[in-house]
Image: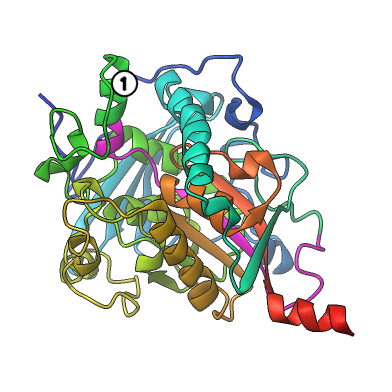
Amino acid sequence: MFPPPLVILGGVAVASSLRGRSDGLVSAFSPPRRPRRLASPPVRSLSKAARTRGGAAPAPAAGITVASASAAGKEICETTVTDRGTAEVLCTVSNEDDRSSLWSDVAIEAARQFTITQRRKLRDLGALDVERPVRILGEPVGDTCGLGDCVVDFDDDDALADNDSNTKIIHFQRHGQGYHNLICDMWRELGRPIDFDSPDPNLNPVVRPEFLDPPLTALGMQQCASQRDLCASLSPELVVVSPMLRCIQTAKLSFRDHLDGVPWAAHEGCREELGLLVGNKRRPVGEIRADHPMIDFSDVEHDEDVMWDEYGDRRETLLEKSERIYEFLTGYVRRRPEREVAIVCHSAYLFTLLNAVMEVEDEELRSWFLTSEVRSLRMTFVDREDRKEESKA
């Protein structure tokens, strides 16, 4: 029997048996390195804005109090008083000395294989050679990349020094482990292949109706909470989330220190692929908004999941997804006034974005994201017509 979905109501006790990571993997999936600018735990890092204000530590979000925190940082319980007057308690257990235990060998190997197979699919479909009116260039903003460490190094103040309105710093994060990820990893551990194109639940567990908008597992929550210090050190002016529950939960755990003073918005342009897979179908917006009133859902057009329903029993193709991503980046992200943006979304979406829509040379940036992983890059929009005029001149 599969474990029941985890609900964060009244209280949650998180406890997981975690497996270690194997050695000898490619550099994109090497064990995480602690970002060199972060303070040693349990001291929380200061954001760039906080340092500018004179070194004051970032204040906790309104309504949040720390119920308990061990000296070693092993268990942290936080109580949130909602607008409806109810209390939600979230406890996370983390090992700050060895975050590598948060990702199993199976999950790491799956990410490595997806990097190979999905890039081959994109190449075979011609998705890597599509020329669009706007080029979207991406480059790392730190010296090195690794799990949770491919982020802005604010010791270098030149990240946005050129004041070019067509250049932004984007912090991409994949959601933490969801129940659909857990079940798929269990199938892989048992040696059972998964056919994600099949409507048969005996071949594809993610088509089961029980997987509708799955939440994070206890391990997924722990993964996201482990990224909090890193995300607190960033300075996003906007947090954009996929309207899927696992992404909202991820953002509220990892970017918890940015709940006050920074706008949060949901957008369907950064959702995972549409159709067939029930794990990628969302709940009605009215239900989601009631649970997360601090998020702006005005850019989500329909209450019901019309986008997913339109595909029926087929999956959105890689080319269709590429076009949706391109429209999101050029029609929404580019037009937003914010220069530094956090976007919390999904693995297959991010892989297509970084390989088929953006022009990115850095191999580690382009590889498959592990759950909860954060990567930052400098994104520059270049109109091809402008380049043509410059060349004529």
In the rendered structure, which amino acid carries the disc numbered 1?
Answer: Arg
Above or below residue 368? Residue 281 is below
* Residue 137 in sight: yes
Of residues 330 and 68, the one drawn nearer to the viewer in this rendering: 330
Residue labelled with disc 1: 188
Does residue 348 appear left or right of residue 368 in this picture?
left
In the image, taking residue 382 as reference, residue 208 lies left or right, namely left
Q: Is residue 71 visible?
A: no
Residue occupying the point 74% across, 48% down: 142
Write the residue at 22% across / 55% down.
Answer: 281
- Which residue is at 18% across, 69% downward? 84
- The image's colouring method is rainbow
Residue depicted at x 26% and y 32%: 195
Is 27 situated above or below 214? above
**Residue 143 against residue 305 in the figure, above or below:** above
Residue 266: image location, x then y, percent: 36, 68
Circle 1: element type:
helix
Q: Quarter of the image holding residue 306?
A: bottom left
Q: Would residue 100 appear left or right of 180 to someone viewing this image? A: right
Looking at the rendered image, the quarter that the N terminus falls into is top left
* Label 1 Cα crowd, 10 Å radius (few <14 / some 14-19 / many 20+): some
Residue 136 image position (x, y, % from top left): 64, 65
Dividing the picture into quadrants, the one containing residue 271 is: bottom left
The answer to if 173 sits in the magenta stretch is yes
What segment carries the magenta color? 157-182
Q: Position of residue 314 (x, y in %)?
A: 22, 51
Rendering coords of residue 204 (x, y %): 20, 33
Q: Quadrant of the C terminus?
A: bottom right
